[in-house]
Structure formats: C-alpha cells, structure tokens
Image: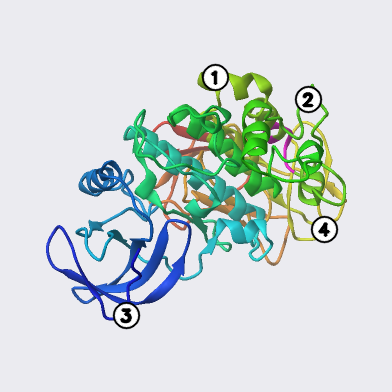
Amino acid sequence: MAELKPGTTVDLISGGQIKVVKELGRGGQGIVYLSEFQGHQYALKWYTQQYPDTFYNNLKHNIEQGSPSKGNEFLWPLMLTKRQYDSFGYVMQLRPQGFSEFGDFLMAKAKFASISAMITAALQICQGFYFLHLKGYSYQDLNDGNFFINPQTGDVLICDNDNVTAQGQNTGILGKARYMAPEIVAGGKPDKYSDYFSLAIILFLLFYGNHPLEGKKVLSCPCMDEVNDRKFYGSEALFILDKDNKENLPVRGVHTNVITRWPLFTKNLQDAFIEALSQDLIKNSTKRIIESRWEKVITSMRNLLVVCKNCGNETFADIEKQTACINCGKPVTVDYQIKTTNYGNIVLSPKKNVFLGKSKQPVAAVRINKADPSVWALQNLSTTTWMVETPSGKLKPVGQNEIMPTKPGLKITFSQGEKGEIV
C-alpha cells in the first residue's frame, strides 16, 4: 500500500481536501500523519493494508453517528477519505500534550503521579466502555494501544475507534489474543460480553502491571505461536491468582509488579478480579462483571484513599480495623468520615479531594488550619450551594468555595438526593 508524502492532498467524502504535513507514527494497521484541513491540524490515519467494503462502510457509519460520549473520552473518527492512492483513511483530533500510551505504563516508560490518578484512569476507562455499549457498539480489536492516559491527572483518551462496530457484527478485524475473551480467541464474534472480559484484562494491567493470564504455566512455554495463543488465552485460560487452581501462579523475579502490588490495593478490588477472571466467568460470558459494577468497586476504593500523616503519601484506610501505610508501614488513623446516603463512607484526610460516586469532579476538599493542624474544614468545590444541618436542627448554606467545619453530627445536602453526615 502506498505511503503518503508530505504535501500530498487527500479527498474527503464530505468535501474538501486534507493535506499531509508529516508522519507521527505507525502501527500494524497503518500510518498516522499530522495533517491540515481548513486551517486546523488533525491526525490522519492512513491504512497500509487492504480492508473490505464492510470495514469501510462501518467506519463511514460510525462517523455519521458521532462519538458515543459528549465528553472527551474518545478520539472518534471525524471524517473519512475517498478511496485513493490504493487505500483510504480517516481523520481524528490530535492527541493533546501530556498523554502517554497505555503500553508506556506497562513498560515503565510512564508512571502515574499518584494513586488518585490511577483510579481516575480506571474510572474513565469504565465510563468509555459504558458509553460505547449504551450506543449498541462493541470493540473488534481492544488492546493496550486503545488508550492514551495523562499520568498526572489520570484523564483517558480512547483511540483506534475505527474497529468499533455494532454488537454481533464483524468487519473481519482480528484482535490480539492477549486482550480478547477466550470465546473470541476460539473464533467467536465479539459482543458486549467479550468486551467485559477485555475490560477486566485492561483494569488488571492498569492496577497490577502484569497480565492476569500470564503466570508460570505460560512462562514454561518455549514459544508463543498461534497454537499456544489459542491455548493460554482461549481453551486453557487461567487467572494467575485463581483461588482453586495454582498452576499459573506469578513467578518471583518475573512477575514482580503483581506480587508487589496485589496486597497494596483494597480487598474488594482483589475479590472483584478473583471473580471476574474465575473459570466460571471465563466460560460463562453472560455472568461477567459489567462497567457499573467495576465503577462501584473502584469508587469504594477511592473513598478509602487517604494521605498518610507520617510520610505524606497516599495509602488506604480501613474503617473497620487499623491498617498500615503501604508506603512507610506506620499505622493509618481515621479521624473523620462522611457517611453518605448513596456512596458509602468516605474517609477524610488532609489534602484529600472528596468525590461522590464515579464523578470526575470533586465536590469538596479537606482544608487544614495552618495555625492549628488539628482543625479541619471542608471546602465546597461544587457549583451548587450545600445546606448544612447542625445536630440541633439549624440550617446554614455553604456556597461555592466556602468552608464548613468537620464536626461529627453535621449533615450535608450536597444536591438533590445526595446527602452525607460527618461521623
């Protein structure tokens, strides 16, 4: 297939021409070029292999339908080129500065600035899956190349959406065995249930840094060919921390990330992965964990995230028993919590931002009195006015950016249906 030289113009089916400026990168499907259209810069993905009309028409349909989300989660195809120069391509927004490929995190070329950023990334990935499925789509080729992540904030961009298609349909694209559900490795058609399995793989890689199906059993294989791909990711797929089968456990000195990180995160996250990657859910696709369940697990973990008073790093608290900081090993104390109506208990700590559920934006921040660090307050970071009720029944409004004391017994109405009490 022909590569495009700088200065080449390509016709768009919607009218006009886009001009190639320079190459940005290339992969298995094609080459991405920096391009210009009507005075603005875009990314042009140009295919370097042949694809059938079904793929081209599906891409055209996705562009016409628009992004599944009104937010910025997707680098969705915007314009399609005509077939020319023995190929075709599509136009999308450029990746903003500050974002790294998901694979860079797995290879330690990029690192999350905080656990908060990692949790934000996980929630945004879940949100992307949710919006996609809500529109009736499923992925054809989900892998670590589908995500760009900002290591400072955890913001996520989902790319390579040209492979997305309506559930139950297939455009002839084959994915990577390491990310596909076992039934797809065996030759089945992708759907939302196979996406749920892929989501569990991606989230496990995000949190634990090793592949959940690649333990000592896979390590003993001298050569990973197609036959072994179908075996280890398909017919004999086995979670490395399966509670009943220990044949594929992580190997010390090889799977260092998961061995180190597994005990650091909360038990509810561990339990969710043990369930999601169990033999029962590997074989019974309709029972798999969906996005909203993952969001609930991850947000409950975010509720327990605190800043250690001893070392100043993020760790997790346990409201039922005393725990040790995952960084310095010293005891983690719980001073105040917000007991919410819908989102469980949120542990407070100095410098912590408070989120309600899966929200991207914090509703509050814990502020400490500089003159007396024992005095804490909550600052309203939301756009709505809170109504605070004292134990005696008095009501006081707390507007945007205003503060209130963190005194046990104070009840907060954040907005309609969202209430909490400081305990």
Question: Dividing the image into 4 quarters, which one contains the C terminus?
Answer: top right
87 relative to 357, above or below: below
Q: Please name whichever residue, 3 or 141, is drawn nearer the observer in this view of the structure.
A: 3
| Location of mark 4 (residue) | 310
| Location of mark 2 (residue) | 243
Residue 337: x and y, percent? 65, 40
| Location of mark 3 (residue) | 6
Measure the C-alpha gap from mark 1 to mark 4.
43 Å
303 relative to 281, above or below: below
Asked whether the residues under the numbered discs 3 and 2 touch, taking CB atoms below 8 Å apart as contact, a structural biologist would say: no
Left or right: where does residue 292 sit relative to residue 211?
Answer: left
Measure the C-alpha gap from mark 3 to mark 1.
50 Å
Place residue 287 in its image quadrant.
top right
Q: Is residue 393 visible?
A: no
Asked whether the residues under the numbered discs 4 and 3 touch, taking CB atoms below 8 Å apart as contact, a structural biologist would say: no
Q: Callout 4: few (<14), some (14-19), or many (20+) C-alpha neighbours within 10 Å?
A: few
Measure the C-alpha gap from mark 2 to mark 1.
18 Å
Residue 160: x and y, percent? 41, 53
Residue 212: x and y, percent? 69, 39
Boundaries of the magenta span? 265-269
Q: Is residue 143 part of the magenta span, yes or no?
A: no
Q: Amino acid at mark 1?
A: Lys
| Location of mark 1 (residue) | 287
Asked whether the residues under the numbered discs 2 and 1 touch, taking CB atoms below 8 Å apart as contact, a structural biologist would say: no
Q: Residue at x 70, y 28 (%)?
A: 274
- Disc number lying in front (4 or 2): 2
